[in-house]
Every structure is written in C-alpha cells, then in structure tokens.
Image: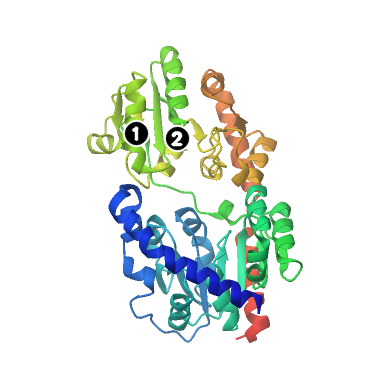
Amino acid sequence: MMSTLLLTIYNLLFAAMLVPAALFLLLFSGKYRKEVFYKLSERFAFWNKLPRSEKKTVWLHCASLGEVRAVEPLISGLSSDYFVVLTALTKTGREYAEKINKTGFSAFLPLDLYPLMCKAFKAIKPDLLVLVETELWPSMLYCAHKKGVKIMTINARMSEKTFKFYNFAGFFWRPFVRFIDIVLARNAGDAGRFARLAGGRTEVYVSGNIKYDRDFSVNASRKDFGLNDGDLVFSAGSTREGEEAAVAAAYKKLSEKYADIKFFMAPRHLSRIEKVKDILKAAGIKFSLFSDVLLTKSAERGFILVDVFGKLQSIYAVSDICFVGGSIVEKGGQNPIEPAAYGKPVLFGRNMENFKTEAETLIKYGGGIIVSGADDLAVTADKLLSHKDLIAETGQNALKAVESQKGAVAITIKEIKRCMEATYGAE
C-alpha cells in the first residue's frame, strides 16, 4: 500500500532529524526553546491518565491559540453528549486549552511519529477525530484510518498558496488527505481546494467560519490602561517584521496633529520585543511598555509597546481604530474578525491571503479599509479621526459584517452529531 511506504519513509526522516533539531533549538534558539521544551513529556505522549467516560469520545485537535479559542463554543455544544479531548501544538494554545473547563482532557499533540500516535490513540480511544483548519499530520491520519476512527476536518482552511504546496507534493499528501471522511470548509474556495486534493474521495461541504461565533465579550475599560475617555486610541495588532517601522512613522505624523492620540502596538511574537524597541528608538519615539502601564494605570506617553500576552482583545475593545498586522508584509495577514466584532474600523494591507474571505466581507460591508504603507496608514487614520461619525459608521459596518457570518458552530455541531449517529447509531 502506497501510504504505508510513504509513512515509513516520512517517519524515518522525521526521526533522523529529531535529535539534531532538538540540539539546535537547545543550544542556539532562545526564541523557540521555551515553546518546544514546555511540558516536553506530553510531546512523547506521556500524559496523565485520562479519565474514562461512558460517552463517546471526540478528539478535537487545534494548532494554536486562535483555533483553541474558536472551538470554545463548539466544545460547549458537544460536551453534554460527548467526552471531549482537546490537543494543541503551541504553548499558548496548550495553556488556554487547560482553562476550558468543559473538556474531559487536554494536552500537547505528540510528535507525529507513528509509534507515538498509536500510543495517543490507545490512551484516548477516540470515536471521532476532529481536525481544525489545516492540521494534516501523516502519522496521525494513518493511525486513525488504520484503527477505523472517522476523521473530520472542520473550519477547513486552505489558501491558494498552501494548496500549491500540497498539490506540488501531491504524490505524498494525497494518500493521507484521502483518509479524511468529511471536510467542513469555511467557504467555497477552501472547499474546492480540499476536494481537488482529496480527489473526490472525501465528503466536502461549506459550513462557514466558526471564528465568527466566538464570544467576544471582554471585561475591559479605558481606565484599566490609563486612558482618558477623550483619548484617540489606535491599535496595531500582531505586527510583523517590516511593519513596526511603518506604524511608528504613521504615529509620528498623527501625533503632530492629535496631541491626545495613543498608539498601542502588539508584535505578533513577543520574542521580537527587543528588536521592536530598537526600531522605535531609531525612529526617535519615546514609548512605554504595556506591562508598566498595567501596573501604574497610567499611559503618560503616546506610544505603548505591548510586551505581555493575552491582552490584544481588550486593547481592540477600547480602541477607536484597529490595524491588523501581517498584511503589509507578505505574511498572509491575521484575523480581522476580532476588532470587527468590537465594532471598530479595521485597517489591513493587501496581503490577506490567509483571511481572504474575512477581509473581502469586511470591505463589502464597508467595515474594512486597505492600506498600503506608512503614508497610507497615516492618511486613512487621519480621515477617520477627523470625523468621529465616520469612525462610528465604519465600526458599525464592521460589526454587521461579523453578524452576517454567524451560524457555523451550529452547522458544525449538527454535522458532528450526524457523523457519530451514522457511524454508531443514535444513543
């Protein structure tokens, strides 16, 4: 069987690279060391003993924090009928998974080596494996198929760029993708690309994006961040290398006109904080660290560099205008739904391939605006800040765009239950 041969080669290569990769991370990479070695035993499927349940088990696997947050309402809808196991890849995702009190068990996903995956399946004993977005792991897929476990991919996302990669290496990926029984895609484009990769052997449906259904309520006020009611607040979230300088330049221009403006900038990766500090110093910008602002409840300086994790939603909620990073540079963009859900005008660059449908929906409703760089960012922000009614109108349009897309969680829960009943019968 071709998939068996490919899996053997894949596992041999994976195992051969594991030790040198671990040594490199240990010796040279401060950026990823804490990430990789956090709860390291779990990555080898050394878990605490799972509690047992008489309910059928749904194993839900996410990549990172964004996906774990997105599945919270899904877990709430499934936990009364099923025992839900949640795994994640990243440290932040794993930490947040532990906070969701409706799961039966949470842990890191083991390394994608066949013996470790067999160990994980033996421990979890899933009746259904649910993968979120584009979590395609050959050993995991093969093991589930071999053990007769149904596989479903939900909120399936595959950009044109990602599809080109999988399609180019289709001789390897197609045998494993075809093990997936059902794909619930975010939109028609994602559905079509998954269908082509699976070669017609997988049921593929459009269910919508579950990230619109999240509970976006936060307990935050401007006073928490040392802000006054009259301050003009601009936030730049999840910025990447090449964007911080543009945000800094826009701030310098706007601060000349608006004395009461406050800029929050949150780099996508906190490991880059020192580099971002150097960028701001080179631009001649005096800034405060957000961690200090939280302690003092005072934002004396106009520019605040966010150096703590988990506060971006609260910052979006108290902002007047929001910019979503990863979009001026070619990183595919970040999720624009979060600021839009708080009724804020959302600015982003042209590189929104990873969130193409979301960006197009915001633009269609008049809640999203494309900017091309520092000058455009400053001009667009100035236009909005000069007309408070335009901020309110654009923000309401963004909120309408989010409301128009809700409902994917209900569809996804219905399809999961349908799959379970078709496989095991109604309980």
Q: In the rendered view, tell whether residue 53 sits above or below residue 347.
A: below
Q: Which residue is tagged 2?
A: 241
Q: Which residue is tagged 1?
A: 275
Residue 129: name its quadrant.
bottom right
Give the amino acid at mark 1.
Answer: Lys
Residue 348: name its quadrant.
top right
Q: Position of residue 156 (x, y in %)?
A: 62, 59
Can you see residue 249? Answer: yes
Q: Position of residue 96 (x, y in %)?
A: 39, 59
Left or right of 107? Residue 322 is: right
Name the residue rendered at 31%, 65% in the picture: 39
Name the residue rendered at 37%, 20% in the picture: 283
Left or right of 326? Residue 178 is: right
Q: Secondary structure at mark 2?
A: loop
Q: Quarter of the image containing the C terminus?
A: bottom right
**Label 2: how many residues lie within 10 Å, few (<14), some (14-19) or many (20+)?**
some
Q: Quarter of the image containing the N terminus?
A: bottom right
Report the number of discs. 2
Q: Position of residue 346 (x, y in %)?
A: 56, 34
Contact, mark 1 vs mark 2 (Cβ under 8 Å):
yes
Residue 379: name its quadrant.
top right
Q: Secondary structure at mark 1?
A: helix
Can you see residue 227? Answer: no
Name the residue rendered at 60%, 45% in the picture: 355
Name the residue rendered at 58%, 26% in the picture: 372
**Mark 1 or 2 closer to N-term?**
2
The answer to which of 202 and 359 lies nearer the viewer is 202
Q: In the rendered view, tell whether residue 55 sits above or below residue 379.
A: below
Give the amino acid at mark 2.
Answer: Glu
Q: Position of residue 179 (x, y in %)?
A: 65, 73
